[in-house]
Amino acid sequence: MKLNELTIKQAQEGLRKKEFSAVELAQACLDRIAELNDTLNVFLTVTAHEALEQAQKVDESIATGEDIAPLAGIPMSIKDIVVTKGIRTTAASKILENYIPPYSATVYQKLIDDGAVMLGKVNLDEFAHGASTENSAFGPTKNPWDTSRVPGGSSGGSAASVSADMCLFSIGTDTGGSIRFPAGFCSVVGVKPSYGRCSRLGLIAMTSSTDVPGPIAKTVEDSAIVLSRIAGCDHRDATTVDREVPDYEKELSRDMKGMKIGIVEEFLSDGIEQDVKHIIEQAIDQLSKMGAEIISLSLPTVPYAMAVYYVITPSEISSNLARFDGIRFGTSRHDQAKDLLDGYKRTRGEGFGAEAKRRIMMGTYALSSGYYDAYYRKAQKVRTKIVQEFQHAFSQVSAVVTPVSPHIPFKIGEKATDPVAMYLEDIYMSPPSLAGLPALSVPAGFIEKDGKQLPVGLQIIGPQFEEARILRVAHQYQMATPWHLQKPSLMTS
Ligand code: GLN
């Protein structure tokens, strides 16, 4: 096995036993990036020099027998919407093409303080608006399982970088599915923590009421290791909560006995591809064999989540993107403008891509006087009903499982001109986002298409702040199934 193919757990062992050095591990990942980045378009910025320097420091501390930090020498990639001091952060937008942040996001800083080695910044849909990574101003990322297909989005670069063994883990962000969805399409594990579990400080804001950062990794165990390091209260993000962070890794080993798993009737009836449905049913059977009791639930308001999401998020987006005015930071066209308004128009007209503009317009409309009550306010009311429906569901079950997506990974370009078809991909992802619940995606099998193996993900949703519980279900499931051991054929080419 090559070093870049290791899991975090394996790499931690190997480093501790001095079987290889942190520099060798970082170099193996950098070689893999050099080999594949032109094909997959994953990294927007590679920080090779800094990575090797950081790895060197880790090797020195290992050599002197110092107490080594929890993630010492573990190579990672970071979604390019998480600000990194001194390192270009673009949000995959032309408007931030040359933006060098003066500070670092809390989650990134925590990982660096824990000794993780940053390899670079990875692609996404512009400002995280999308489900395919095609909305990037720097071109689409390709799915490692079939390069004619999308990796999912918006954290497509994160999921592809982990799936193609370019790094050991990545940090993505999830507003309405952006960690779970690409993790499902790339057959890796993606965890969206509860809203308030991990600091949003330094995430370039998309939808402030649902944005959360979280890990994408090769196994549930690795995700638990990373989540334990990034979770916690941050006095610079008032929406984080001061609750104890469990040792998620320790919690994994308890079995499934006594667990009640809910399945949502509404989600397994219409609109789902039969092959995907079949795989999800097999996964549910597997959970039942492992001792879980399966309970069928009806959540009648939850199918409206997607409509609610596409009123609330554009509203918040239109407000959050107002700061990109060409005056304070980022690309500016004010020098070519005849007056201030013309400067805004040129900067924003040239700087934003089509999807960001669409959302600014939809959001501005939904918030405008006369429409606010009919759209934004109504959507917030339905959101409250969704929260209540989940609360009621969790009085009956320990966790809820759904598919990640109703479809297999689709072809690049297939949905690019049909925004509604793209939005519909979020149907199972947006409900837990609106309710602030923890949810994850775990590999659940493959569908063969055009001679390629295309991944299918299982979503597991838990009550607020019960990350440990969903990680445990996912880990037990992963231990009983072989899906995470399968690698895209890029690996053997
Ligand atoms: N696909 C969703 C959207 O386009 C989710 C995005 C996200 O979670 N950042 O809004």
Image: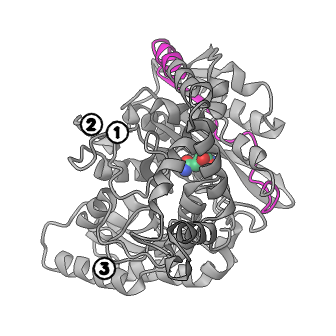
Tell which residue pokes out farthest to the bottom in this image.
49
Q: Amino acid at mark 3?
A: Ala
Q: Is residue 95 above or below residue 268?
A: below
Q: Which mark is residue 241?
A: 2
User: Disc 1 versus disc 2: distance between alpha carbons?
Assistant: 6 Å
Residue occupying the point 53% across, 21% down: 381
Q: Amino acid at mark 1?
A: Gly
Q: Secondary structure at mark 3?
A: helix
| 216 sits left or right of 229 in the view | right
- Quadrant of the drawing holding the C terminus: bottom right
Give the residue pinned by disc 1.
196
Q: Which mark is residue 55?
A: 3
Tell which residue pokes out farthest to the right in this image.
450
Q: Can residue 439 be seen here?
A: yes
Q: Amino acid at mark 2?
A: Val
| Crowd tier of the residue under label 3, counting other residues whose Cα lies within 10 Å: few below 14, some 14–19, many 20 or above | many
Dots 1 and 2: beta carbons under 8 Å?
yes
The part of the image, by quadrant, that contains residue 148 is: bottom right
Q: Nearer the viewer, mark 2 or mark 3?
A: 2
Q: Sequence order check: which comes first, mark 2 or mark 3?
A: 3
Give how far across and how far down residue 102 sits, in percent: 30, 72
Towards the viewer: 96 or 104: 96
| 268 sits left or right of 219 in the view | right
Q: Sequence order check: which comes first, mark 1 or mark 3?
A: 3
